[in-house]
Amino acid sequence: MRIVVTGSSGFVGRHLCRRLQRQGHSVTGFDRQPSAPGSGFTFAEGDLGMGRGLDRIDWSATDAVFHLGAAGVKAGARDWPSCVRVNIMGTLNLLRCLECPASPTLVYVRTFYEDFIDVAPALAENPYVVTKQAATRLVREFAGRHPGGVVVARLFQVYGPGDASGNLIPHAVRQLRAGVPVAMGSGTGVRDWLHVSDVAAGLEACLVAGAAGRGCEYDVGSGELHPIRDVVGRLADIMGRPRSLLCFDPALDRGDTHIACKAERPPPEWRPRLALADGLADTAAADQPEDFQ
């Protein structure tokens, strides 16, 4: 298949592009900056929010699109103007491109946090979550009239090699390697953790379901909840570091710590390959590259 991936330079995007290539697909990445040298797939530079660069892609020769591109994924680069421009207007720009004779299958990626805006005031003030929820509504409306099929994939707590250094697991790995304390919140929150390689496989399974005419909404997650405290404790054990280096401070908890949500509707014929312990071991053993956009 000829596949376009928006957000191809991001954490999940890079893993997904590599997997799709290994499966024999022809991949074109679309992002504001190129992927790492030697990535091997075709790259089209552009800006979703401005619609710039979208005309460089031959949509009439495209079989499927994974829409991962988004602004505000990183807490340190999260503001209303960019999130509205990229997440809402950028999604609209992409959907217009898909209204072509080829009618490519669309796999749209959303976050589980969108489902809790009404019960977690902190999320209602989060520009990334609010604008992603709006974009999801646009995609659902588009699905009703798009003949090529649309699959909405809900992601949970993704981790693995190449994650942004400011996120919990990379931060803990870096601190534990150095043998210095790991400062974090209370650790009482529970999350559905899934290694990024399994996320890529799950998204591919969503595409297979959509291309077969069974497009709907699926959960790409483990289906299990694990407390943050337990996960970083396991990580310390794997790395041979004392758990006494883990410093839990409830004052550092975010406003969404209490949310508990796990995958319940996986795509057909897909299940995670890596158990949590194996995924953490793989992450701890890997060299962490520089942050992505």
Image: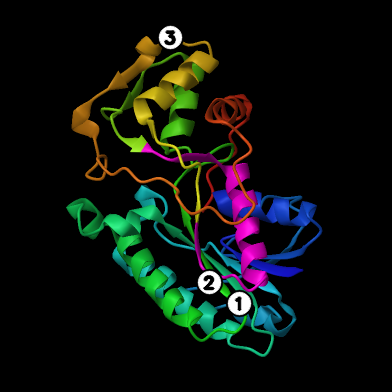
Closer to the chain start, of discs 1 and 3, is: 1
On whether residue 23 falls in the magenta region, the answer is no
Can residue 79 be seen from the camera position used here?
no
Three-letter residue code for mark 3: Pro
Alpha carbon separation for disc pair 2 and 3: 45 Å
Q: Element type at marker 2?
A: loop
Within the image, what quadrant is residue 141 found in? bottom left
Q: Which mark is residue 242?
A: 3
Farthest right residue in view: 24
Residue beneath label 2, please? 47
Q: Residues within 10 Å of mark 1 (few under 14, many from 20)?
A: some
Within the image, what quadrant is residue 198 found in? top right
Can residue 107 be seen from the camera position used here?
yes
Residue beneath label 1, please? 53
Q: Which mark is residue 119?
A: none
Mark 2 or 3: in front is 3
Three-letter residue code for mark 1: Gly
| Tag 2–tag 1 contact (CB < 8 Å) | yes
Q: Element type at marker 3?
A: loop
Q: Measured from the top left, where is residue 291 in percent x and y?
A: 52, 44
